Amino acid sequence: MAKVSTSKKACTVNPLKMSQPIGGTLAFMGVEGCMPLLHGSQGCTSFGLVLFVRHFREAIPMQTTAMSEVATVLGGLENVEQAIVNISNRTKPKIIGICSTGVTETKGDDVDGFIRIIREKHPELDHVKLVYVSTPDFKDAFQDGWAKTVTQMVRDLVSAPQPGAPRRTGHVNVLPGCHLTPGDIDELREIIEAFGLTPSFLPDLSGSLDGHIPDDFTPTTLGGISLDEIAAMGSAEITIAVGEQMRAAALAMQEKTGAPSVVFDRLTGLAPNDELMALLARVSGRPVPRRYRRQRGQLVDAMLDGHFQFGGKKIAIGAEPDLLWATASWLHELGCEITAAITTTHSPLLERVPTDEVLIGDLEDLEHRAADCDLLITHAHGRQAAERLHIPLFRLGIPTFDRLGAGHVLTVGYRGSRDLIFDIGNIFIANAHEAEPDTWKIPNEASDDASASVTTH
């Protein structure tokens, strides 16, 4: 069992953590026709906008209530009202997702009360859904903001089934954690549909941030799950949640719909994917498709092929709790030693991470603990630490702004687990070759003291 501790430094150096409102905003981007709105200063929105544009390399819809110093002191009703009216008139969204920020939470703005007043004053906006989530950025982290937002969408947008109404046979709700990429969601959809089931993902980033070119420009999200489909999730047969962060959302869905829920703390690795296949086989009444039996065999073969590269390697990981858990557990199963584990916020999984200590800290803490490691795993802000330590960096998580295809990285399923073996194993192989000396000393048979030099090319 790992010891969980919190850094006691006076300030954060080279932050690993991202804020709650950024996580909540990303969750809203998985809903069709949505305009995320940050209730705070312009700088809060500008930061998140730049971060997402650099990571996904796509147009990102985000708006702000643009709170000034005076507005913050007097209260933000006028700013929220003006923002909602302007957004509704200009961009025609189906839903506006509102996330609070530190400055408005410190002031104590009653945004739920603001929304009631705005509804009374503007009945012409009745067709626009308004979902508000309290996400102060002075506490918790990115993962928490995502989880709270999905939970609130379940409570506000999912319709409870009518008493005695039949379930939609073969329909499955999926609540993905923020550590899953659009590529991961596509992979899970393909797996579930292979069993003859129909999945609904909330949120669905694979429809909005997968890098496709739209037929027409829209100022709101380009795709994602529709409001009608969200409402219909109440009649699904079962809910599958991916990541411990989604447990609250899964329980909210279960309480509202009466359908059972299952939480997978990870879908990276052999055993958890075996459990997923067994669950889908039970729900569908079908055997596991041949393609996934073959993919399982490929994963086992990749584990055999890579065990020489992974055995005994020392790894340092900095990531959100669910991503840390999934990555550290898989690498530990492959024979690696998790020497350093740094995360951003509390989670029940942290004590189970296969290491001596998990620290809630920053990238400076990760760098100090990674000095003798063979690999550093974190997002792109860890690149300077890797350079200083002279160890390779495997980029994982948000933001990854110095590589292409971050939204299509695959880490789930048999195929994603296999790809992680190849990607990381190849780094080990390349680094081992780079570390080999260019010159080898060969003893001279004529003298014990003499030696000849042979240069390798």
Image (spheres, grey):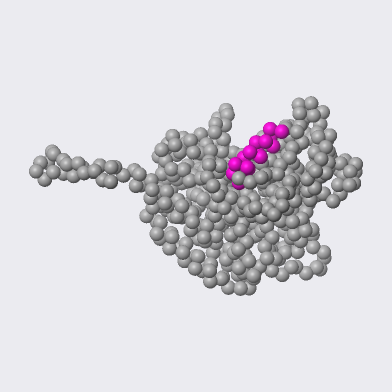
Q: Residue at x 50, y 52 (%)?
A: 329
Q: Residue at x 63, y 43 (%)?
A: 52
Q: Position of residue 48 (x, y in %)?
A: 65, 39
Q: Residue furthest top?
A: 70
Q: Main secondary structure of the magenta part?
A: helix
Q: Residue furthest left?
A: 446
Residue 244 in sight in this render: no
Residue 44 sits inside the magenta stretch? yes
In the picture, measured across the screen, residue 335 lies left or right of residue 198, that is: left
Residue nearest the viewer, comparing 404 with 182: 404
Q: Position of residue 343 (x, y in %)?
A: 56, 42
Residue nearest the viewer, comparing 387 with 288: 387
Q: Position of residue 434 (x, y in %)?
A: 35, 44
Name which quarter of the figure residue 38 lies in.
top right
Classify 202 as above or below 116: below
Name which quarter of the figure residue 319 lies in.
top right
Q: Residue at x 50, y 65 (%)?
A: 295
In the picture, measured across the screen, residue 84 lies left or right of residue 148, that is: right
Residue 139 sits inside the magenta stretch? no
Task: Give the magenta range.
Answer: 42-56
Residue 450 in sight in this render: yes
Q: Position of residue 270 (x, y in %)?
A: 50, 60
Q: Residue at x 84, y 34 (%)?
A: 78
Classify 82 as above or below 148: above
Classify 256 as above or below 400: below
Residue nearest the viewer, comparing 173 with 220: 220
